[in-house]
Amino acid sequence: MRAGMNETPVAREYRTGSDPRTLRDALGCFATGVTVVTCIDEDGSPVGLTANSFTSLSLDPPLLLVCVAKSAASAGPLSAAEHFAVNVLQTGQRPASITFSTRVEDRFGCTEWSEGEHGAPVLMDSLSVFECRRHAIHEGGDHFILVGEVVKATFEPGLDPLLYFRGSYRRLHFD
Ligand SMILES: Cc1cc2nc3c(=O)[nH]c(=O)nc-3n(C[C@H](O)[C@H](O)[C@H](O)COP(=O)(O)O)c2cc1C
């Protein structure tokens, strides 16, 4: 909500021991894109989850990272897989973002995909796709930090990104 002429915006505050909801709200002020991180599990089945904790890490060597909740069903397969893919979503892929972040029986049955060069699932019509070899896994509290070395990157120059801000999906609105 915007402060009107006579209203002063009220900043909210988190401190150690405060309600974690307030911390989440503070973190939600950082606008991000949305990705679906995928791999193939030990049984050969595709696995993936929606993640906005994606960051580029290094150009030489080419590294990126994503933070995965240890409690996620995909956590085991993603930490074990030799290869994974980060699919950066475009505005038309909001349904995929919802599918890969909620309890849907067959996430890959609802979304068109194909195997990347090293097997990790590539979602059709993604804005960009980074196919990675697992480089390192670091400890991060209730998450782990999955670092990948980019072995292949593709992108669509003409599409707009799906964005996430304050708990809602957004799109770019000026150019
Ligand atoms: C926009 C958005 C971003 C998310 N980012 C992450 C993330 O970076 N890491 C994570 O572990 N979960 C993230 N989640 C939550 C997971 O997508 C969600 O918990 C999912 O159901 C986990 O699936 P799984 O338990 O089958 O692995 C995000 C959810 C949404 C909607």
Image (spheres, helix red, strand yellow):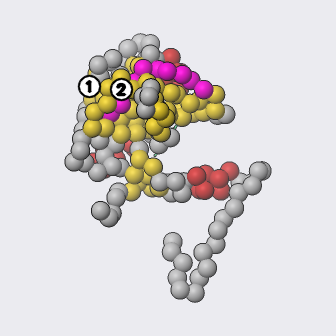
The location of residue 138, given as percent across then percent down, is: 60, 26
The residue wearing badge 1 is 114
Q: Is residue 132 above or below residue 52?
A: above
The residue stretch that appears in magenta? 129-138
Q: Residues within 10 Å of mark 1 (few under 14, many from 20)?
A: few
The residue wearing badge 2 is 131
Say if the magenta span includes residue 132.
Answer: yes
Q: Quadrant of residue 60?
A: top left
Give the Cα separation between the discs numbered 1 and 2: 12 Å
Q: Residues within 10 Å of mark 2 (few under 14, many from 20)?
A: many
Report whether residue 166 is seen. Answer: yes
Closer to viewer: mark 1 or mark 2: 2
Relative to 110, is 29 on the left or the right?
right
Q: Secondary structure at mark 1?
A: strand
Q: Secondary structure at mark 2?
A: strand
**What amino acid is found at the position of numbered circle 2 in the picture?**
Glu
Q: Residue reaching furthest front? A: 60
Which of pointers 1 and 2 lies earlier in the amino acid sequence?
1
